[in-house]
Structure formats: C-alpha cells, structure tokens
Amino acid sequence: MQRILLGQAAPGMVLAREIINQDGMVLCGAGTALSENLLRRLADMEVVDITVEGHPVHIEGEKTLAEELHEVDLRFKRVEDIAPLMYLKKRIQARIAAARSA
Amino acid sequence: MDEKKRAQFRKVLREIKSLPTLPGVVAKLSKMAENPETTTEQMGRVISKDHILASKLLKLVNSAFYGFPQRISSLNSAIVLLGFNVIKSLIISASIFEVMESQDVELWEHSLGCAVACNVLARHLGVKDPEEISTAGLIHDIGKVAIKMELPREYETITAMAQEKQISRLEAEQEILGLDHAEVGSWLARSWNLPNKLIEPITCHHDPLSAKDERLASAIVHFGNILIRALGYGHAGDIWVPPLNNRAWKMLALTPADIDPLLAEIEEKLWEVKGFSLDIQNEASGPA
C-alpha cells in the first residue's frame, strides 16, 4: 500500500483505499482500477493524493524496506531484554514488510 | 549535581512564565462548574464567545483521537459527551499546543499519535471515559514543552547529550537538570487544577506504578507512549522505545493475539489524522 500524489498515479494501478472528498463523500471505492478517464475526473475534482496497492512508485530519497526494518531494530535497541517488546517489534516489522507487498 | 543550580532550575520551571497562561475562559468555566445550577448551554455560550477556541475544540473532538462514531457539531453536545473535565483539559491543550505546534512539530505529532494509541488501548480495555485517557496521552509530554520554553539553553544541551551518549532524553534531563519532564508536567497540570485522572498519567507515564489513584490510566499512557514510539510516529526527543514496566504490562493483561489488531487500529487512525493541525487560520474554507 502506498500513498501517492494524483500526478504520480498511472492507469492500471488499483486503489487500496477509497477516495473521500472534503465533505466526507466517497468518490471512488477501494479496489477500483484506475483508468485514464478516471484519473482525469479525479483531477477535475481536485483530489490531491490517493492510496494504491503495492508500492508502484519509487520516490527519490524514500527508505528501502531494509532501511525501514533497520530503523525499527534501532528504536528497540535499548529494550532487547523485554520479551513483550521484542514480540511487538517482530509484529511491527512483519506489518511493514506486508504493507510493501500488499 | 550542583544543588544550587538544581534549585534554580526547579524555581524557574515552577514559575513558568513563557507558556501561555490559562485562558480566562477556563477560570470562568471552573467557577461555573462548581455551581450545580449551571447548564451545559450556559457553558457552551461562554466557550462560543471565543470563536477560534470553539472551532479548535470541535475540531479536536471530531478528530480520530476521540473516535466518536458521529460528528459532534455543537459545543453543547461536546460538553455533554465529554464531560467538563475533558473539555477543560482540551481548552488547555488547545492553548498549549498552539505554542507546541509552531515550536516543535515532531513533538506535537508524537503527542497526537500517543493520544490515538491511548484511545485505542482504552477502548480495547473497556475502561470508563476513554476520552480522558486520550487527553492524558495528548498532554503527557507537556513538561518537555515547558523545559524548551523556559530553559532553551539547557534544552539544547539535553538534546546534544542524549544524542552523544545514546541515552534517552529522560536520562539526559535528569543528568542536566536534576529533574525530568514528567515532574515538570506534573507541576503544570497541578497548577492548572487538572483532575487527578490527567495529573497522574502525566506524572507517572514512565513509572506507572508510582500512581496512587489512577494506576490503570497511567499504565495505558505508559504503553501508549511505547506503542507510538515503536511505530516511529512523530519524534519525542530521542529515538528509543522506552522500557516497559512489567507490572504495568500485567495490569493491561494484553496477549500476543491482541497486538496485531491493536496495531492495525492505531495505524488506521493515524492515517486519518495525518496532517491534523489545530491551526484554524491556515486552512482553506474547510469542510462545509
């Protein structure tokens, strides 16, 4: 799952989350495949960012999965002797990895 | 550490000058709350006189931090739903965070994130008044703001020492000031006459068992703070996940099976509050 600017979206990408406008109205449901036509309409409705499945856009300066996992390791460095926190760390890392591939 | 210096820091922080004083409206409302004849409408009217404050309050109340299923559109319903204590602490938070948001965006993010985590935990545990616990989470690090405002030089030294020695900000504070942000936050909360349910979690968020009356609330803020730091949301002055108090952990009675659903719910709500700001003026016309 990746949050991207509408300008970075391309036809074929699939929405991972619904698009909601300022008034809380759903413009487009999760699971919708984006088309040229739809992207144009979203731009007309002044949608700024959307969330798509997978991780299709490489953003410069963005952390790699390995870097992200390493940062989690580092944050937990001082509590490695506390079992519940080590479990928490494992789950957070698993979720980060899963979010990249989903 | 030099006793004289320590006493001096203590004095400065106890007589905090640069933090905004409590808006007059709080004193007025406290007085009104003492009178059993006061109606919610009357209180609502007093708050509404300050338009910016009123819109900030409604914005906070409707944010994912409190997780009300329905939009609360009037101050009166907010007062009824949240109770006077929460409203009072929200007015205080709104005033404090005006400073914090402009001064330290990352600490502000950490505080908002902690409020979200506390709210999710409190609801999961089925405690009474989860809103008060979210509010405690929102202001648990208020002492850090006070230290930054009152002792900017020492604040920088603390930051540098924490980084250099790879220790927590809390430890660096104790080393340099002989006191820490939890203690300072405690003085502030007391000076504002906040209820114990907010004072104790602020005072005891690193040592929840030292709480006397509000041990569970303190344990929730203790773990909420750990969760949000574990997720790396915002920045609270150092990168470390703080140690978990074993007895507080037992009190929360969470099992491994609880962790994933809790994380999922917190992540979902963090998503919703991303970019949340109390800054009313900087917004476009806002939702209709």
Image (cartoon, coloured by chain):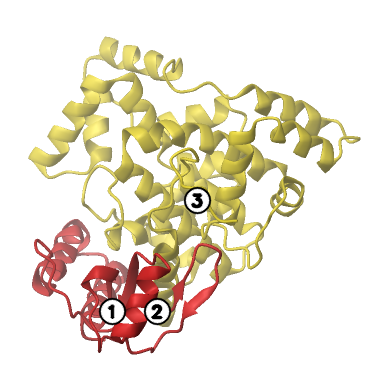
Chain colours: A red, B yellow
Residue placed under numbered mark 3 in the picture: B218
User: Between residues A68 and B55, which one lies in front from this camera angle?
Assistant: B55
Cα distance in 3D space between marks 3 and 1: 34 Å
The relative height of residue B134 versus residue B231 in the rendered view (above or below) is above
Looking at the picture, which amino acid does disc 1 mark? Met
Discs 2 and 3 share one subunit = no
Please name the residue that numbered disc 1 is placed on.
A1
Residue B41: % across, % down: 83, 41
Along the line of sight, the residue nearer the viewer: B215 or B69: B69
Mark 2 lies on residue: A17
Three-letter code for the amino acid on which mark 3 is drawn: Ser
Q: Position of residue B281 (x, y in %)?
A: 48, 37
Given this view, does label 3 or label 1 mark the residue nearer the observer? 1
Q: Residue at x 62, y 63 (%)?
A: B68
User: Does dot 3 land on a helix, a strand or a loop?
Assistant: helix
The residue drawn where x is 13% and y is 64% is: A62
Label 3 is found on which chain of the structure?
B
Q: CA distance from mark 2 to mark 3?
A: 35 Å
Q: Nearer the viewer, mark 2 or mark 3?
A: 2
The quadrant of the image that shows the N terminus of chain B is top left
Task: Pick whichever of labels 1 and 2 is earlier in the sequence.
Answer: 1
How many marks are shown on the rendered structure?
A: 3
Asked whether the residues under the numbered discs 1 and 2 touch, taking CB atoms below 8 Å apart as contact, a structural biologist would say yes
Q: Residues within 10 Å of mark 3 (few under 14, many from 20)?
A: many
The amino acid sitting under disc 2 is Arg
* Mark pair 1, 2: CA separation: 9 Å
Please determine whether, in this image, residue B210 is positioned above or below residue B47: below
